[in-house]
């Protein structure tokens, strides 16, 4: 048979009844062309494809499209039950044509009535029947328009009907009759020898498969959907039927999926029939191949205990169920659901024998051996549970967090005591809270752990899971802090037993605090050597506990909580000065004072981040990098974590990765990316009930709104942060809100308000160790304090910054420190400091801060009557602000340029900010008049423009008569209704 090429699909997806026929645009376009040409001279076409490929759905769509083209449609469906009943299929065509049959020539009518079983004493000959049917269809087409015969399951047509319809198919060119049929690939049919074209209906591509499942099961977790798509291999029937084998918990990924999915009843009929027909020895080999999963023929040969594996697999290969590649020594199932059929047809005893046989082929301690022993276990088995426990943490470190949690749950099922089961469930809850997502599932796991081991509810893992749920969900840092400090204290004081579940391993331990270790002498090993050293599961849980406590302290913003953290961390004797936890405590917990001591370690971790597979270490390294300006080195790794989360992996970590990438986008001036990153992260927070985790995302959106002049959004965000954070004692959110409000005020040149907001969280001359975010505020405070005449406070704060060593942390912080000191100076311009800040190497990497510094320098230069030099800085600042969309800052830079006599065109859409074009005002008079029109007092205007109140009054006195107004009340109308005229 020849294979026609489908024409290019037009119009994307087509509607199929009430819904879309997903992924079949090319096929529907082919059918449209088929009916278009058949209406003139007749055509025939066979659709082939594997069982469940969607051939019947395409035939249904074809019938509808044919009717839309005025075809008279006749449907036929082959039936296994009626395959032996002569003319049963043909009767489906003739039944609705009773009236037309009566109008045929008498002998033709008698022939067809005989076919239908109407007794008239005559036997129907096949050639006579075929001729009569052809005449009947031709007449019907001539009278009522073209005819379409649509036949499904042609392999099950009875032989007499098949012969007749085969003849009709060969003769379609003689009349406007279209014959469209469908059969499974490889099934013989009456059309096989007719020479008519065939078209193979291929499986859906991955995109269409995802769309089909998501449309039918929108609440299904992405990772579960990905698994189903992989199992179905594009088979639409499988895509729609496999979800029926999962319960709601499995669809939401709150319950484990089996390695091989069970077959629902409709799929058993499709995939099991060929497996059942195989010899017993072949089925045994296929079962071993399914249980092994690797496809290695050598494993099957050893597990089978000898024999000719290739010969035994021959029947399965001939049946089209498997492919055997002797060059690579591998076996592959042609369709993933064949594996399900093999498993479905096996008994529990056969599966257990297979797992035990395969377990013997792997070394002791290997993951494969542990899994096969677990699958072969009948009832509790503590030895196998311990093996799975080790496997779970290996999976976690290589990046499969979801798999690790599932393995812990299986280990819990195999545990022989309530104590062991409770501890394993608590560990699963701990990792679920901190890594994989869904806090609601954490609550259920903790409940199960308490039922299994009521005495273990205060274990370190249970306390960490409960605290993480309290912090990330409710924001209850006080209860979480108490839970964690008590649990860590008990852990440090408790006996060191030999229980594998809580084996505290991992090398020599010192006696100092994390901060002491971070600053202390280092060993001779590399960072990676330390990270990859031997670790027990207990060490992982201890890490999770300490990291959850660190996050709790960070959000609280309270010194007493940090003090308790350091005390408890010292008691558990931190393993190594190169540990990531040490770096986090210093670079993230207290970047102003402790970061310089760990920067070398952090830079080493960042250099290896591209090789890191553990999403926990990726995100936590990026967290350590955030306040010390090293996030650009984390971008690629963070995107990997985001992709893993989108695929249903470590969701909690993916949310953090979104906000870290948004943080980087803000600092690097990629402001267009920030809303998209935070929006997706916040959507996940809402889905998984992570309310405190969402606050950094909201803060970044509020900060961007403040910088771009969206005052309403900035104010609303700041108010929301305070309203949610204050009742919970979350000092960080108060600092976030002050930052947003201060930046908004600075953009509007409202320095007094900016000072007031910042002063609510800052003490001049102090850089508190318990508020890491203060590192982002010192330039803002220096500008607000200096511009409101508080030069002493500004200078004291800058001196404190220099005293901490902050400038040594990063070029950006050095640039900002120089700028803050230059801004704090009361009178003379410190050109050296300003120029050093402006000339910072690669300063353009931080465009917003750099433009602010150039604006500040330009303002000082203009007031010092160094107009030419000022203009270069002001113009550069204006260009950067406009590119970023920082409207208030653009206005400040433009006003300064106008005041220096340089005309500045406002960007499109800012007509309200255009200068008055007909009033003969000087640039300085125009600037003062604009500020006065907003309602500011002379003193406030003077503070903004570095003028005395007397000078401001003089400018207004000159402006009033020029604008033909007598008071401030008339300034606004005069300025918005007239345009400026530039004067020298």
Image (tube, rainbow, N blue to C red):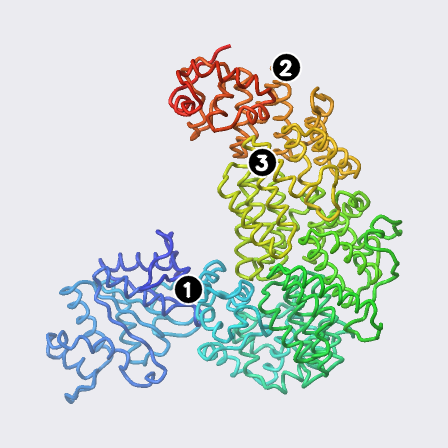
Label 1, label 2: how many angstroms apart (C-alpha)?
A: 77 Å
The residue drawn where x is 14% and y is 88% is 120
- Whether tag 1 and tag 2 are in contact, CB under 8 A, the answer is no
Label 3, label 2: how many angstroms apart (C-alpha)?
A: 29 Å
Looking at the rendered structure, the secondary structure element under dot 1 is: loop
When asked about the image quadrant of residue 568, the answer is bottom right
Q: Residues within 10 Å of mark 2 (few under 14, many from 20)?
A: some
Looking at the rendered structure, the secondary structure element under dot 2 is: loop
Is there any visible trace of residue 613 in the rendered image?
no
Give the foreground label among 3 and 1.
Answer: 3
Residue closer to the observer: 108 or 585? 585
Q: Which residue is mark 3?
A: 753
Residue closer to the observer: 785 or 655? 785
- Image side of residue 250 versus residue 783, left or right: left
The residue drawn where x is 56% and y is 22% is 896
When asked about the image quadrant of residue 748, the answer is top right
Give the foreground label among 3 and 2.
Answer: 3
The image quadrant where one finds the N terminus is bottom left
The percent position of residue 495, horizontal first and vertical second, equals 84, 73
Sequence-earlier tag: 3 or 2: 3
Residue closer to the observer: 391 or 506? 506
The percent position of residue 456, horizontal first and vertical second, equals 72, 76
Q: Which residue is mark 1?
A: 201
Residue 866's disc number: 2
Is there any visible trace of residue 363 in the rendered image?
yes
Sequence-earlier tag: 3 or 1: 1
Q: Residues within 10 Å of mark 1 (few under 14, many from 20)?
A: some
Specify the farthest residue to the top.
984
């Amino acid at each position: 048979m020849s294979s026609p090429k489908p024409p290019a699909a037009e119009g994307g997806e087509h509607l199929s009844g009430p819904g879309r026929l997903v992924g079949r645009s090319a096929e529907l376009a082919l059918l449209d062309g088929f009916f278009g040409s058949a209406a003139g001279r007749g055509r025939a076409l066979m659709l082939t494809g594997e069982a469940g490929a969607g051939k019947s759905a395409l035939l249904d769509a074809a019938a509808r499209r044919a009717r839309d083209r005025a075809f008279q449609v006749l449907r036929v469906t082959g039936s296994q039950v009626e395959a032996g009943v002569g003319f049963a299929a043909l009767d489906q065509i003739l039944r609705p044509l009773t009236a037309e049959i009566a109008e045929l020539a008498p002998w033709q009518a008698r022939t067809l009535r005989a076919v239908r079983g109407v007794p008239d004493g005559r036997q129907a000959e096949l050639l006579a029947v075929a001729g009569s049917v052809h005449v009947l269809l031709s007449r019907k087409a001539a009278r009522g328009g073209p005819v379409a015969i649509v036949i499904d399951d042609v392999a099950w047509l009875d032989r007499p009907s098949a012969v007749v319809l085969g003849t009709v198919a060969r003769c379609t060119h003689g009349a406007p009759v279209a014959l469209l049929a469908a059969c499974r690939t490889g099934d013989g049919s009456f059309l096989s020898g007719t020479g008519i074209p065939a078209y193979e209906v291929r499986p859906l591509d991955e995109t269409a498969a995802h769309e089909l499942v998501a449309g039918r099961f929108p609440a299904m977790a992405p990772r579960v959907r990905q698994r189903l798509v992989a199992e179905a291999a594009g088979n639409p029937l499988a895509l729609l039927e496999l979800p029926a084998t999962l319960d709601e918990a499995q669809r939401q990924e709150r319950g484990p999926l089996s390695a091989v999915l069970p077959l629902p009843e409709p799929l058993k009929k499709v995939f099991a029939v060929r497996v059942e027909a195989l010899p017993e020895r072949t089925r045994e080999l296929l079962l071993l191949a399914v249980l092994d999963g690797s496809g290695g023929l050598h494993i099957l040969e050893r597990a089978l205990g000898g024999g000719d594996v290739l010969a035994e697999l021959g029947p399965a290969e001939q049946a089209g169920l498997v492919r055997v590649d002797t060059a690579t020594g591998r076996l592959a199932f042609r369709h993933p659901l064949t594996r399900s059929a093999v498993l479905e047809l096996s008994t529990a005893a056969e599966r257990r024998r297979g797992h035990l046989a395969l377990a013997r082929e792997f070394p002791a301690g290997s993951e494969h051996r542990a899994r096969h022993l677990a699958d072969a276990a009948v009832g509790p088995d503590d030895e196998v549970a311990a093996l799975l426990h080790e496997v779970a943490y290996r999976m976690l470190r290589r990046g499969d967090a979801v798999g690790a949690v599932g393995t812990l749950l299986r280990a819990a099922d195999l545990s022989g005591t309530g104590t062991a089961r409770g501890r394993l469930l608590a560990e699963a809850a701990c990792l679920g809270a901190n890594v994989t997502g869904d806090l609601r599932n954490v609550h259920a796991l903790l409940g199960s752990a308490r039922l299994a081991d009521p005495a273990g509810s205060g274990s370190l893992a249970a306390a960490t899971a409960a605290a993480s749920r309290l912090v990330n969900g409710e924001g209850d840092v006080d209860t979480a802090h108490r839970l964690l400090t008590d649990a860590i204290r008990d852990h440090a004081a408790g006996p060191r037993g030999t229980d594998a579940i809580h084996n505290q391993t991992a090398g020599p331990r010192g006696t100092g605090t994390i901060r002491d270790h971070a600053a202390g002498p280092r060993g001779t090993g590399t960072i990676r050597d330390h990270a990859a050293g031997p670790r027990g599961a207990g060490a992982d849980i201890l890490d999770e506990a300490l990291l959850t406590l660190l996050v709790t302290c960070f959000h609280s913003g309270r010194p007493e909580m940090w003090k308790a953290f350091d005390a408890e961390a010292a008691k558990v004797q931190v393993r190594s000065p190169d540990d990531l936890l040490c770096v986090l405590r210093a670079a993230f917990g207290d970047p102003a004072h402790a970061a310089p001591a760990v920067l070398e370690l952090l830079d080493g971790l960042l250099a290896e981040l591209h090789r890191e597979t553990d999403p926990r270490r990726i995100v936590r390294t990026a967290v350590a990098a955030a306040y010390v300006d090293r996030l650009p080195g984390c971008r690629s790794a963070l995107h990997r974590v985001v992709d893993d989360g989108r695929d249903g992996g470590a969701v909690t970590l993916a949310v953090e990765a979104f906000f870290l990438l948004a943080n980087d986008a803000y600092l690097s001036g990629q402001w267009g990316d920030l809303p998209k990153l935070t929006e997706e992260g916040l959507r996940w927070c809402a889905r998984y009930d992570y309310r405190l985790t969402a606050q950094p995302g909201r803060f970044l959106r509020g900060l961007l709104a403040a910088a771009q002049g969206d005052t309403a959004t900035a104010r609303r965000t700041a108010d929301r942060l305070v309203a949610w954070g204050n009742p919970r004692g979350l000092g960080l959110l108060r600092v976030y809100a002050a930052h947003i409000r201060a930046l908004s005020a600075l953009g509007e040149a409202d320095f007094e308000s900016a000072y007031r907001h910042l002063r609510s969280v800052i003490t001049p001359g102090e850089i508190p160790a318990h508020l890491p975010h203060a590192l982002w505020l010192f330039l803002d405070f220096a500008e607000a304090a200096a511009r409101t005449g508080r030069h002493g406070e500004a200078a004291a704060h800058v001196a404190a910054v220099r005293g901490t060593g902050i400038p040594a942390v990063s070029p950006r912080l050095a640039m900002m420190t120089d700028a803050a000191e230059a801004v704090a100076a009361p009178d003379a311009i410190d050109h050296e400091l300003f120029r050093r800040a402006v000339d910072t190497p690669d300063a353009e990497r931080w465009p917003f801060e750099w433009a602010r510094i150039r604006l500040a320098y330009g303002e000082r230069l203009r007031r010092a009557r160094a107009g030419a030099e000022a203009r270069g800085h002001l113009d550069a600042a204006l260009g950067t602000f406009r590119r970023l969309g920082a409207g208030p800052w653009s206005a400040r830079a433009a006003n300064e340029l106008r005041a220096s006599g340089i005309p500045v065109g406002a960007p499109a859409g800012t007509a309200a900010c255009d200068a008055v074009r007909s009033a003969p005002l000087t640039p300085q008079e125009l600037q003062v008049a604009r500020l006065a029109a907003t309602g500011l007092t002379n003193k406030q205007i003077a503070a903004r423009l570095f003028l005395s109140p007397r000078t401001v009054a003089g400018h207004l006195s000159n402006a009033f008569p020029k604008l033909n107004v007598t008071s401030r009340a008339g300034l606004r109308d005069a300025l918005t209704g007239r345009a400026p005229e530039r004067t020298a």
